[in-house]
Image: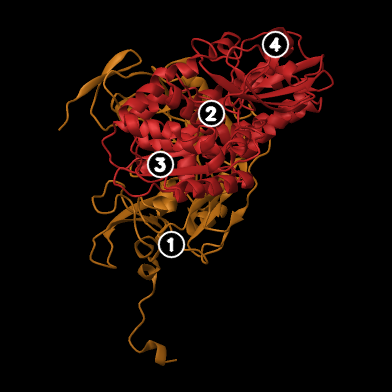
Chain colours: A orange, B red
Amino acid sequence: MAEEFTILIDGRPAPARPGETILTVLRRQEVETPTLCTHQHLTPAKTCRACVVELKGSRPLVASCERKVEPGMEVRTDSERVQNARRGVFELLLSQNDVSTAPGLVSQAEALGADPDRYRGQRYDRGFFDDNKLYVRDFDKCILCYRCVEACGPDVQNTFALTVAGRGFTAGISAGFDETLVESACVFCGNCVEVCPTGALMDRREHSMREQGRWDESRQDIVQTTCGYCGVGCQLDMHVDRERNEIVKVTSPDQHPITLGFLCVKGRYGYSFVEAEDEPAGAAKQV
Amino acid sequence: MAMHEAVLLRRRGAEQRNLKAYVASGGLAALAKARAIGPEETVRILTDSGLVGRGGAAFPAGRKWESVRTAKDPIRYVVLNTDESEPGTFKDRVMIESDPFMVLEGLLIACYAVSATGAYIYVRGEYGRVADLLQQSLRELQQAGHLEGIEPQGRPLRVEIRRGGGAYICGEETALFRSIEGYRGEPMAKPPFPTVAGLFRKPTVVNNVETIANVPDIIAFGAKALRSRGTERSPGTKLFSVSGHVARPDTYEVPFGTPLSELLQMAGGEADLQAVLMGGAAGTFVFPKDFDLALSYEGVAERHTTLGSGAVIAFNRQTNLWQVAERLGRFFAHESCGQCVPCRVGTRRQHEMLATLAAGRGQGDERGLLLRLSQVMTDASICGLGQTAATAVRSLMDAESAGLLAH
């Protein structure tokens, strides 16, 4: 175990351990830090720039989610420069994206005092894709955080169906040559949906219930079970609509030692059998 | 007007551009000397010469080489950045077309000095002729056995030429590595720096063509050869790509410290120039009151501008510089890789506002917003593209406030 050392955060000493990121230390010190692209189980993509901090000796600000601590570091999070950059990131996103299913983004923007009307200009208009039975893609909501790419790739699934295509403002998530998901290498594990921070990727069930005004998480109970499809033992959280007594979504706790919140297509989407009526033996032959 | 002796471009226009002619005019003596004195001494001479990188960042070349030379990892690379894509910049193309062997000799010395196990030349996609010329010249060097005895394990050195696909961002060194590795050209966070974890995450020297072209003379004639020209803090000569409203747009080689006005005069600049854009799209506008500035690193810093890539684009008084800015804005918006928010969305918003201003349809608050946005892009972008995408615009706004614009 390497030696603990001290770094300065806004002038106050904070303990830090080798290998940690600045963000880890900030969170331990309970320094409020906005984040969008970073995810506890994924490689820091450092693309959203919401968590930037001032680091003594560095001309540009640095992404705290990615930068590893070093002894003697002096970090500032309370400067006008940092606040201005963070606010700018959110204002730029608000000028391009549909954030109607991204409450986390909106609340962080508000906390920073971001003005949603600061920048005018072309908004995203890249279409809604409903090309398979399990999840939908609404790219007007995509902030290009790269989480889905990483979850589909080496961080979780190793399927590599998703990538970033295009450049600049037109860059976006693609399943390879703009194929539909069914035509692509996608295995429908839904782990991209799990990590999407803005609802750009959403289970089809949840999407249609939202469309019908029936999605209300306060009316859902979580019923825990263990997936019965194989012997791995993934814990499943069945989200059950209390009034209709039906399963509307399946997730896994993000701290579960086996899943870390990730599942396969069977565990996440293969639940309709639970609600199927039992048929009496031989019933099909009668009538 | 003083005539300046060509140093890097001394073989420009030579009748014969083959290895035999190169050797006959003193070529490959530096490589032979490097082999005789060994890697450590070779790097020491380079460090003593004070050579700094000519790609724009002006990092001491010797320090870069020394950290790779002393790296623990036995696998190391040298990468020659020939992805010359900065608008108004064409000096590396002229350098290679004038003297491909001097560039390659510099590259071989670099490989020898840091015990490189391989080398890559990343050539801008549009530079087909440059790639062919390098390939042909490499073949001649290889056939004459000059690629032997460089690679530390005794194999002939492998030098691969890779062509870019037309992305400005791939000139950024870490995006360039990604591109060579077969990935999307997206810049990576620094640190780790290339000398620690560069191409294929191995210690890597990445140098600009003009930097490498300086190496053979420094090794052959000693550190003082470079210091015999230029200024104390900017030794040597510099290539400038001069274009725009000048009678003789071309690549010019002048000693550091030469006044900008003299360079413009050499190129036949119009008498009533409104401004020049120094350093390319990522540079700043410079106006006649500053044309006396000395073209050296310290000289441009004094006037808050940059040598950048060595681009000097001249504009006469008929030019609406807001339209130039709009064009620069379009360039950055098109060339942003799209990875980070400040650059992906910021360059787009910047271009939209510049287009409004250039068309004379401004609503009054664009300048304030541009300034505000420029701070976000400069502070929070991952790489130099986003960090400098607003530099020229900011200098234009300053000039406008000072009443320097013709329109």
Chain of the residue where label 1 is placed in the rendered structure: A
Which secondary structure lies at badge 3?
A: helix
Residue located beneath label 1 in the image:
A188
Amino acid beneath label 4: Phe
Name the spot of residue B233 as percent of width and height, x first: 49, 11
Q: Is residue B363 visible?
A: no
Q: CA distance from mark 3 to mark 2?
A: 18 Å
Q: Quick one: label 3, few (<14), some, or many (20+) residues within 10 Å? A: many
Q: Quick one: label 4, few (<14), some, or many (20+) residues within 10 Å? A: some
Q: Residue at x 46, y 44 (%)?
A: B120
Residue located beneath label 4 in the image:
B291
Name the spot of residue A31 as percent of width and height, x first: 35, 23
Image check: B367 left or right of A37? right
Q: Residue at x 75, y 19 (%)?
A: B364
Corner quadrant of residue B49: top left
Chain of the residue where label 2 is placed in the rendered structure: B
Q: CA distance from mark 4 to mark 3?
A: 40 Å
Q: Nearer the viewer, residue B84 or B150?
A: B150
